[in-house]
């Protein structure tokens, strides 16, 4: 009985560790201890644990996993850990009972590949049931890159098997794929419009293509029309003229209130074409793009992008930006900020000091103080939709926001004398 108890404790400990990761492949570590099976890859050679082909950058591990996807293999050739019942020896060689929760639904993996193609990850239950893989393409060749997979739509599933498709495509050649450091983390909160880069805790990570580097930094020129604390920066290195970057939103854009976007930009030259493109995440046929041209250099200006007849039903959730489109980069940089729909109210110019909202950010309740008697309080989503409305007749009010989702909102107060004031409101 004592041995059984000890084994049970060991299994629970190992499974918990596996879920928290990272799963790595040094001798004796989780990934190396698991029993892996390669499938649908021609001769199905075993998964290899080899020396890291490049110990610079984001992955300095000595040992990584290697799978060569064969031209004769299926597009969905991959590798999987075995179900616990299939293991020759119980222990950390299996994933264990993995319940997907808000605390572990984000899967990250480092990849180093000889080609650009989709990487797929999925989980399977003890009965081999699965809701399918999620695919994310690498954007770099022959260098380590972190890919992020969002399984928040699968919260509540119980699985015991991890399946990786390192090169999910039809192949005409054998392709070498390395992977390492698989980790499980909390749900990523994706931003909504407007993209002003000021809300702590949101995922403002951009995906680059064509040799660009994009990040969020402290606004180096908080002057003129843009005095905000943070801004996006895109460095256009030497590469194709169509190089750019994209970010994914938490929900699809609603164009019922406006079909025009505004974006503040800071460019080093006049006459630079700035392209704004909107895409559906899964259907490449749903994409639209509009160009605008800079008219000032080395100063902030606001550009407009109108998408006449755009259809909200196409579920545009990816915002793509291109700077100096049509020209090869030379390492110059571009700043951008406040990407938003041009809604009937303006969060940039309509804030008045007579309106005080506290606390802000808030979780359950807010207090509103106004210098004039209020008549109506309206809360809009970042897409311009009315999500809450209250009628009051005093200069002070308390309002419950417990039913709102976390995110950015605009609170508009209409006074009894016909004036209005607005403020950004962060629920989180």
Image (spheres, rainbow, N blue to C red):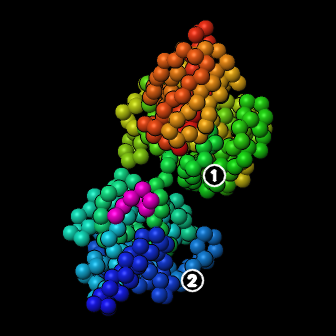
x, y percent for residue 61? 57, 79
Relative to 286, residue 6 above or below? below
**Residue drawn at (44%, 80%) of the image:** 30
x, y percent for residue 323? 64, 42
Q: From this viewpoint, which residue is outermost toward the left?
A: 127
- Can residue 287 be seen from the camera position used here? no
Q: Which quarter of the rendered picture does the N terminus lie within?
A: bottom left
Write down the residue under mark 1. 214
Q: Secondary structure at mark 2?
A: loop
**Residue drawn at (50%, 47%) of the image:** 190
Q: Quadrant of residue 197?
A: top right
Write down the residue under mark 2. 62
- Cα separation between marks 1 and 2: 29 Å
Q: Main secondary structure of the magenta part?
A: loop
Relative to 172, residue 417 above or below? above
Residue 21 placement, left or right of 262: left
């Amino acid at each position: 009985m004592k041995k059984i108890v000890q084994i049970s404790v060991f299994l629970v400990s190992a499974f918990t560790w596996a879920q928290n990761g990272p799963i790595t492949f040094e001798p004796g570590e989780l990934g190396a201890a698991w029993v892996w099976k390669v499938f649908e890859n021609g001769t199905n050679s075993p998964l290899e644990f080899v020396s890291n082909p490049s110990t610079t950058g984001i992955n300095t591990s000595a040992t990584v996993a290697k799978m060569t996807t064969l031209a004769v293999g299926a597009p969905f050739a991959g590798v999987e850990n075995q179900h616990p019942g299939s293991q020759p020896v119980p222990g950390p060689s299996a994933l264990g009972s993995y319940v997907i929760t808000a605390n572990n639904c984000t899967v990250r993996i480092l990849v180093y590949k000889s080609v650009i193609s989709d990487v797929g990850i999925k989980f399977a239950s003890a009965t081999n049931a699965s809701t399918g893989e999620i695919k994310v393409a690498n954007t770099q060749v022959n260098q380590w890159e972190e890919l992020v997979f969002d399984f928040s739509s699968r919260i509540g599933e119980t699985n015991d098997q991890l399946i990786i498709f390192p090169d999910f495509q039809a192949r005409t050649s054998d392709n070498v794929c390395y992977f390492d450091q698989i980790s499980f983390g909390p749900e990523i909160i994706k931003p909504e419009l407007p993209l002003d880069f000021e809300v702590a805790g949101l995922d403002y990570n951009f995906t680059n293509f064509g040799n660009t580097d994009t990040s969020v930094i402290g606004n180096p020129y908080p002057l003129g029309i843009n005095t905000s604390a943070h801004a996006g920066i895109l460095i256009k290195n030497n590469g194709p003229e169509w190089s750019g970057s994209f970010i994914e939103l938490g929900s699809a854009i609603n164009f019922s209130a406006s079909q025009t976007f505004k974006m503040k930009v800071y460019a080093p030259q006049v006459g630079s074409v700035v392209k704004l493109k909107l895409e559906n995440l899964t259907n490449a046929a749903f994409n639209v793009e509009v160009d605008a041209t800079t008219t000032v250099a080395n100063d902030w200006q606001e550009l407009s992008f109108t998408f006449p007849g755009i259809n909200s039903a196409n579920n545009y959730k990816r915002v793509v930006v291109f700077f100096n489109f049509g020209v090869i980069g030379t390492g110059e940089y571009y700043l951008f900020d406040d990407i938003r729909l041009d809604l009937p109210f303006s969060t940039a110019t309509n804030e008045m000091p007579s309106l005080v909202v506290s606390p802000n950010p808030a979780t359950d309740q807010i207090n509103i103080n106004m210098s004039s008697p209020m008549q109506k309080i309206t809360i809009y989503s970042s897409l311009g939709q009315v999500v809450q409305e209250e009628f009051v007749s005093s200069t002070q009010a308390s309002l419950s926001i417990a039913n709102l989702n976390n995110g950015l909102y605009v609170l508009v107060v209409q006074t009894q004398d016909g004036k209005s004031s607005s403020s950004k409101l962060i629920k989180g």
